[in-house]
Amino acid sequence: MATFSVLGLNSLAGRRQIHSLPSCPKCGAPLVEGVLNQPSLEPCPGCQSLLQVEVFPALFRRTAPAGSGEIVLVDGESSCFYHASKKAVLACQGCGRFVCALCDCELNGEHFCPACLETGKAKGKIKSLENRRTLYDSIALSLAILPLVIFIFWFFTIVTAPMALFMAIRYWNAPGSIVRHTRIRYVVAMIFATLQIAGWGIGIYFLIENLHG
């Protein structure tokens, strides 16, 4: 009995067409779809060895070939910004430039030219292409609480409290964690920072009063 799991076929998903299915590791016979992704062991159609084969659904997905762009046939017809001889099919939603079918990069229903797609990825302007985020709420909360937790650094709160309050207000609408969608950390940071600033203000006031008293 052979157990065979195909998990590394994601590279096939990007191809335009799939020309072959996984094969049996024992006899090399192609495995039909009825053998794939089954909850139990299934016999190989060639040698009858029991197999369990798991593949990604993208293996069977057929994607349409990309268009190469139509040639401009009429004078005055809008042409692609990047290919002057190609007919423009739409405008980039990032920069407004006309692009042909070849240059059209569709992403979640939006259309971008190659330059805007690359710029958006590099600068984080296209949220669906983000692979990292700065968690300003965690930074603000750390500035507000850590100096109090590490007691010997409590005097730093005269600096960290205004910084925490500024960050909480400045980045209130900034995208947060992908898995956490609340602003509770901003709220807690603002409360602690405000109390610390008020404490410093009261302390300085009484200190000045005592000096003049």
Image (cartoon, helix red, strand yellow):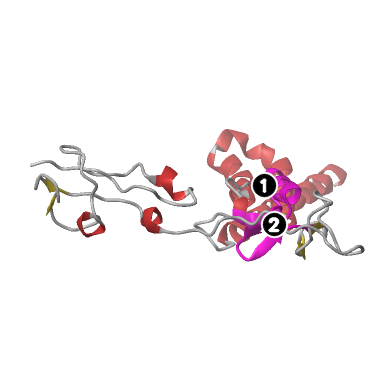
Q: Residues within 10 Å of mark 2 (few under 14, many from 20)?
A: many
Which secondary structure lies at badge 2? Answer: loop
What residue would you read off at disc 1? 121
Image spot of residue 48 (x, y percent): 9, 48
Per the model, the C-alpha gap separating discs 2 and 1 is: 16 Å
Looking at the image, residue 206 sits to the left or right of residue 2; the answer is: right
Residue 9 is labelled as: none
What residue would you read off at disc 2? 104
Q: In this picture, is 174 found above or below 139?
A: below
Image spot of residue 11 (x, y percent): 43, 43
Which secondary structure lies at badge 1? Answer: helix
State the image quarter where residue 77 is shown. bottom right
Task: Count numbered badges in the picture.
Answer: 2
Sooner in the amino-acid sequence: mark 2 or mark 1: 2
Q: Can residue 175 be spotted in the picture?
A: no
Q: Which residue sits furthest top?
A: 152
Q: In this picture, is 138 found above or below 60?
A: above
Looking at the image, residue 94 sits to the left or right of residue 190; the answer is: right
| Of residues 156 and 49, the one drawn nearer to the viewer in this rendering | 49
Image spot of residue 60 (x, y percent): 38, 57
Range of residues picked out in magenta: 99-128
Q: Residues within 10 Å of mark 1 (few under 14, many from 20)?
A: some
| Of residues 203 and 97, the one drawn nearer to the viewer in this rendering | 97
Residue found at x 48% / y 48%: 15
Q: Amino acid at mark 2?
A: Asp
Residue 119 is covered by the magenta coloring? yes
Looking at the image, residue 182 sits to the left or right of residue 79; the answer is: left
Q: Where the N terminus falls, by quadrant?
A: top left
| Of residues 80 and 53, the one drawn nearer to the viewer in this rendering | 80
